[in-house]
Image (spheres, helix red, strand yellow):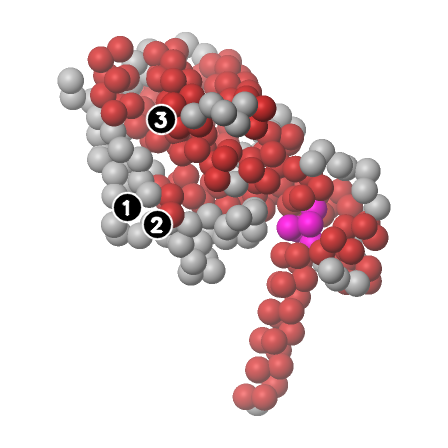
Amino acid sequence: MAELTTTSNRLERRKAHTRAALISAAQSFLAAGTLDVPILEITQAADVGLGSFYNHFESKEELFEAAVEDALELLGSLLDDLTADIDDPALVFTQSFRLFGRLHRRNPEMSKVLINNGLTTAGSARSLAFRALRDIQAGVRTGRFTVSDPELTLTIIVGASLSLGQFLHDHPERDDAQATDEVAEGLLRLLGIPTRQAERVMALPLPDLDAWRGRDGQAGLPDSASPRSAGLPAEANLPRSAKSE
């Protein structure tokens, strides 16, 4: 029985490895904007057999969808974990935007996957747009934000986020943290946060991205997008509120 269990576990690990390799290869093609690539070329990039592809996916489109969802799951888990203990919707929104802006340089492949597919995935429950809308609506309910149409405001924020990412890729000489924070502060004012409060929110420290642990147990984000989600280590705490002036 123990030998059977060991063999079964080994098989499951092999299947998981193959699926992850296919997703990683697909993300590389998505990041490059190459969508007309043959399945054979994807399997070669993943270093798996062509027959293995159909053990996991029925079509190239299904693989690409899974690749985007995987990147969204990774980034969504990161942002949710790093803002889980914050009560102030304005701080949740700001920290998430500032963290995402810093990820464009830290993980350029995942960044390009999200930039190239950000508009088409905006309606997904896992998308960054969905999370941003959730935070905006929470801010409106609590009186922190004073926008009359959260969904319309979201279109501005999504556009700013994707444009910022492309800008940072196009201008490697620019300081990504400074550029991100300038955009974030402008968005806070768009949402109705007074200047002094916006400055106070922006002055709060960000958590250490390298301290975040994925479900593989390793700290920090991987070099390229891969299926990971995990909890926030105790040492990466954030302030709970930034309302006081």
For the point 23% across and 21% down, the residue is 200
For the point 49% across and 25% down, the residue is 173
The magenta stretch spans which residues?
22-26
**Vertical order, 195 against 22 (above or below):** above
Camera-nearest residue between 244 and 179: 179
- Mark 2 vs 3, N-terminal side: 3
Q: Which residue is mark 2?
A: 211
**Vertical order, 212 against 176 (above or below):** below
Q: Amino acid at mark 1?
A: Ala
- Mark 3 vs 1, N-terminal side: 3
Q: Which label lies toward us, 2 or 3?
A: 2
- Mark 2 vs 1, N-terminal side: 2
| Image spot of residue 237 (x, y percent) | 25, 43
Q: Which residue is mark 3?
A: 94
Q: In this rendering, would 208 be left or right of 154?
A: left
Q: Please say if the residues under marks 2 and 1 sit with CB atoms less than 8 Å apart.
A: yes
Q: Kindly report the distance in space between the C-alpha atoms of the residues bearing marks 2 and 3.
A: 19 Å
* Mark 1, secondary structure of its residue: loop
Q: Main secondary structure of the magenta part?
A: helix
For the point 47% across and 14% down, the residue is 153
Q: Which residue is mark 1?
A: 236
Camera-nearest residue between 134 and 218: 218
